Structure formats: C-alpha cells, structure tokens
C-alpha cells in the first residue's frame, strides 16, 4: 500500500474464502470475477462494482471514495 500511497486498507482474498461465499468464481472455478467493494467507516458496504474492467476502474473508485468523504464532512 505504501508503494501506491494508499491511505486505506485493501483486503486481498488469498484463501478464496470471500470469493466462494460470494459465489464469484467463474464457470470452471479456476478464476474469480473481479469485484470491488467500497466499505464505509462504519463497516457497511457502500458500493459494489460487480464486473470490474481494469481500464478506468481506479478513477471510478477514487471518485466514489471522494464522494463518501465529502458526505461524511457534510454530515458533521
């Protein structure tokens, strides 16, 4: 995370426990669909991107994070 300057945790699913619980494995069970979950400060899922395409995805997620932060500031 330091390499990319991220200030939030990323949770890789190295054991495939989450992907199996979510049912996100592809047809042959070999690879998983790419999905992104934005989790708010209270631990709830705020947004789900169910079929991630790499191109432009980082910007889309960053925009959602910024909107979430702005909403938090406004609510205070």
Image (tube, grey):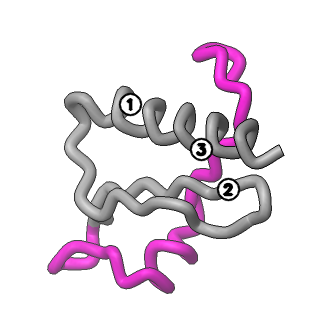
For the residues labelled 2 and 1, the Cα–Cα distance comes to 17 Å
Q: Which mark is residue 19?
A: none
What main secondary structure does the magenta stretch of the protein show?
A: loop
* Up/down of 63 relative to 46, above or below: above
Label 2–label 3 contact, CB within 8 A: yes
Q: Nearer the viewer, mark 1 or mark 3?
A: 3
Which residue is depicted at the point 74% across and 65% down?
43
Which residue sits furthest left? 27
Q: Nearer the viewer, mark 2 or mark 3?
A: 3
Front residue of this view, candidates 60 and 28: 60
Instruction: Find out whether residue 34 is within the magenta segment.
Output: no
10 displayed left or right of 51: right
Segment tinted magenta in the rendering: 1-30
Rate crowding at label 1 as few (under 14), some (14 to 19) or many (20 or more) other CA atoms within 10 Å: few
Quadrant where the image shows the N terminus: top right
Quadrant where the image shows the C terminus: top right
Instruction: Find out whether residue 8 is within the magenta segment.
Output: yes
Of callouts 2 and 3, the N-terminal one: 2
The residue singled out by tag 3 in the image is 68
* Up/down of 36 relative to 58, above or below: below
The residue singled out by tag 2 in the image is 40
The residue singled out by tag 1 in the image is 58
């Amino acid at each position: 995370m330091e390499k990319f300057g991220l200030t939030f945790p990323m949770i890789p699913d190295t054991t495939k426990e989450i992907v199996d619980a979510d049912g996100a494995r592809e047809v042959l069970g070999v690879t998983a669909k790419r999905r992104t979950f934005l989790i708010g400060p209270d631990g709830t899922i705020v947004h789900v991107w169910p079929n991630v395409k790499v191109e432009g995805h980082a910007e889309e997620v960053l925009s959602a994070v910024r909107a979430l932060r702005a909403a938090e500031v406004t609510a205070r």
